[in-house]
Amino acid sequence: MEFTRELYWNVGHGIATLVPMYLLAFAAVALLVRGFIKRRATYLRAAPIDRVDQPLVRLTGALGDMLSQRQVSRVLWPGLAHAALFWGFFLLLVGTTLVFIQADFTDPLFGWVFLTGNFYKLFSVTLDLAGAAAIVALALFMIRRYLMPPEGLPVSRDYLIMHLLLLVILITGFVIEGARMAVTELGRPVAAWSPVGLLFANVLVDMGEPALRNLHRGLWWFHFFCVLGFFIIIPYTKFRHIFTTSANYFFSDRGPTGKLASLDLEDEEREQFGATQVADLSWKDIFDGDACTLCKRCQDRCPAFATGKPLSPMKVVNQIQETAFAAPDDNLIEVVSRDVLWACTTCRACQEICPAAIEHVGKIVEMRRALVLMEGEFPDEATMAAMEQTEVNGNPLGSGFAARGDWAEGLPVKDASAGEAVDIIYFVGCYGSFDKRNIKVARSFVTLCEAAGVSVGIMGKQEKCCGEPMRKMGNEYLFQTLAMEMVELLNGSGCDTIVTTCPHCFTTLNKDYRDFGLTPKVVSAPVFLQELLNQGSLPVQPHPFTCTYHDSCYLGRHNDIYTPPRALIEAAGGTIVEMDKSGSESFCCGGGGGRIMAEENIGSRINNTRVAMAVATGAPVLAASCPFCLTMFEDGTKTVETASPPVPQDIIELLAERLKTAEA
Amino acid sequence: MNILVCIKQVPDMEAKFAVAANGVWYDPTDLAWRMNEYDEYGVEQAVQLKEQVAGSDVTVLCIGTDKAKEIMKKALAMGCDRGVHVADDEVFSREPYEIAAIIAEFARDKGFDLVITGMQSQDRGSAQVGLLVAEMLDLPGISTVVGCSLDGDGLALSRELEGGVRAKVRVNLPALFTCQLGLNKPRYPTLPNIMKAKKKELITIAVADLLKVAGRQATTALFVPQKKGGGLVLEGDPAELADKLIGILKEKTTVLS
């Protein structure tokens, strides 16, 4: 029995210790639970939403996210520090639980002692290292927050109290261990298995046994009370994220990614559409605020925030939570402000990075819905005009609907609305149909299909806007009107594959339209063309060039399509010089969220900011894969201050220019 | 205040127009339809006045085919209380005098305090109907209104004259005015109001019941004018050019008003 230790050494394991200890511990846990139950009442005042379906899948996902710390570790160094603190405390919790199980359960009841021998060695060294890791992590936390805080990171007394409390708990733990070891273990082999405790023991040993025993007993209770204090303040400080963030993984949106909830507009009893007050949102929207740790990763990536607009996704989430708890009857739109709500491009950079699985975009759209549907308000007159144009002509550009198919003149497209048999229906979108620049892309796409022997049908003047910009801008009524009409049209075509060159159309047809019964398969052009390429049916002759590629938000973050566009560029002979912000960290062009219809009058222009990033790569071509991006970049490259701005091109054009049959 | 606002359904001006087979009007194929822009200002003004004067009632009247009900629903969603659809499949062949007579016949015994029409329609553009109605009902008629506010028992109106000049007019009710562009900012109907509009009264009257006059003029041909050389090239020294340009902008546009 060499490798073990006496549990409750020096503090005693009798009634005098156990009764007050357990009573106080239960009381602290009860206070913790009470704190959360009180918060629960506020969550429940909001609207219901089902976030407990498929509980097993949710549970395994949540445990995976929590234990792996993979969400928080996406920002490497602060993330690893957090992971170290988490794993440190997690192991300490496991260790303390083992002590409890042996000392007060298996040993007294069955005489079973397992903290001994090799297992004790593992137990002891693990806990020592866990404690040390937690101290190092905390030190890094404190250096980062108080000595060199990055811009926007909140610094307040609350954080200091939290950090100091944890630090005191960890350090007193080692002093207690050191005092015990100084009396009982110094000079014995077992001491080596508590390396950090051994350091403390060597420092303390000269105090002599009586003083060490007093120090040990006193600090043991002090340490214990600190832990109780920690429990009690969890619901009232950001410590609550230990529970709320973990729970938020369980309650997370299980997709489809970026799909908005469809409002029931048929319900004639309904008097409120969208969210004017907290109660119009769901309980998850309030809970998100409780799960937020103010890490500001969303704010760091928000294109609106980065260009001087008043939107910070983090602030919005917290304003909703604060209003829910402090003034639930307040008008949420006044609290958050219109300029904030209209600034969002729904690019999902915030949600993509959030380590707490918070859903920012849906909240903003819910409040926009209230502005549009309840007040008839829009960010500006241009947006309202675009809405009215869409009602009349089925496109926000205001072009006459009957000319919608004119772009395809001279190309071998069939009229799919007349029921002609085709391989694919090309859902062109408004920009591909009417915008001069994007008509070139639409024509290039058909040329590629023709070269690959794919017969293409279009809906011509029967096609209308998919409704995406309107939906994101809050006009759910117009969106649903368009959606129902388009679903009927597309379902009735008899073709089972729809291809889109616009990522906004793609995401809307493929995800949002499913609520309205769309049945055909929907494929984005880059994925479709990559398949043709892989089958060997696309006769492309590579021709070397250098470009940078802009991941559109709606192909990338909304649909995880990152490699197919790059594969197409490579097939065309392109070498990609990536921008600093690419892939899932791509920076929006400014055209999403219906902003393509609106003026951009606050701060600097998002498209110019993005074009400047492209200029920094030195690449002569700025490859895009979305008509909104292309439009924004055509504008941005004209105003950017550089001698030779990159030429914006869609990857479909780059490919079509390299067709073996093409005269070039 | 008991208000009558008259609206017309017109094609969207972005559409491709073609002369119809009868040679006197455009072919309705492939046209998108909307509320005449001038009339949108009228509906908005009527609803604003209703909001300012308790107990007001706004009737919206539209002469047209069954399709015209689409824009009436929008007017009801914007806040009009009731709709009167004068069913007339021949509306496109009516001359302004007939249209005015139909409106006047309907309005004569209804005790309207105010009749509002657009200054003109975007398609025919005769700019006669409003003032003819005023004459037929023996009401003071004020055209090209760009500002409207309550003034005691009457209205204080602002008119737009040529060259960006404005005139202020005060009128006692009952009266009629026609709306020029820019009178107000027509609202976007809210969803609850769109729902409510579905339940509002919308009656249909056969045109024969209201048309008691015969037309006095007839369009004999509709055609697209031959394209002439576009653009105007100004020459001279810069100061002179600037003056010329300002003169043209003042005369032909409202950008400087």
Image (cartoon, grey):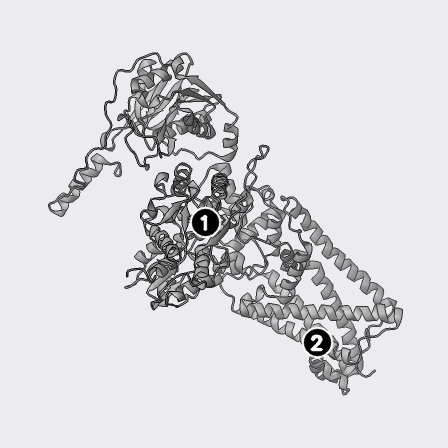
**Quick check: A315 above or below A539?**
above
Chain of the residue on which disc 2 is drawn:
A
Residue lying farthest left?
Answer: B236
Q: Callout 1: residue from which chain?
A: A
Residues at circles 2 and 1 in contact by the CB criterion of under 8 Å: no
Q: Can you say which quadrant of the picture contains the C terminus of chain A?
A: bottom left
Question: Residue A516: where, in percent of width, then height?
Answer: 54, 42
Give the amino acid at mark 2: Thr
Task: Check disc 2 and report the residue beneath it.
Answer: A126
The residue lying at 74 percent from left, 56 percent from top is A31
Relative to A659, is A364 on the left or the right? right
Residue A33, x across and y down, in percent: 73, 55
Q: Secondary structure at mark 2?
A: helix
Please say if A212 is above or below A492. Answer: below
Q: Height in image: B106 above or below A655?
A: above
**Is A252 positioned to the left or the right of A474 in the image?**
right
- In percent of width and height, residue A615 lies at 35, 64
Of circles 2 and 1, which is in front? 1
Q: For residue A244, what is the image quadrant?
A: bottom right
Q: Of residues A216 and A45, which is closer to you in this image? A: A45
Whether residue B56 is visible: yes
Quadrant assignment, res B7: top left
The residue identified by callout 1 is: A505
Q: Amino acid at mark 1?
A: Cys
**Closer to the N terminus: mark 2 or mark 1?**
2
Residue A232 is drawn in which quadrant? bottom right
Q: Secondary structure at mark 1?
A: helix
Can residue A146 be seen in this snapshot?
Answer: no
Q: How many marks?
A: 2
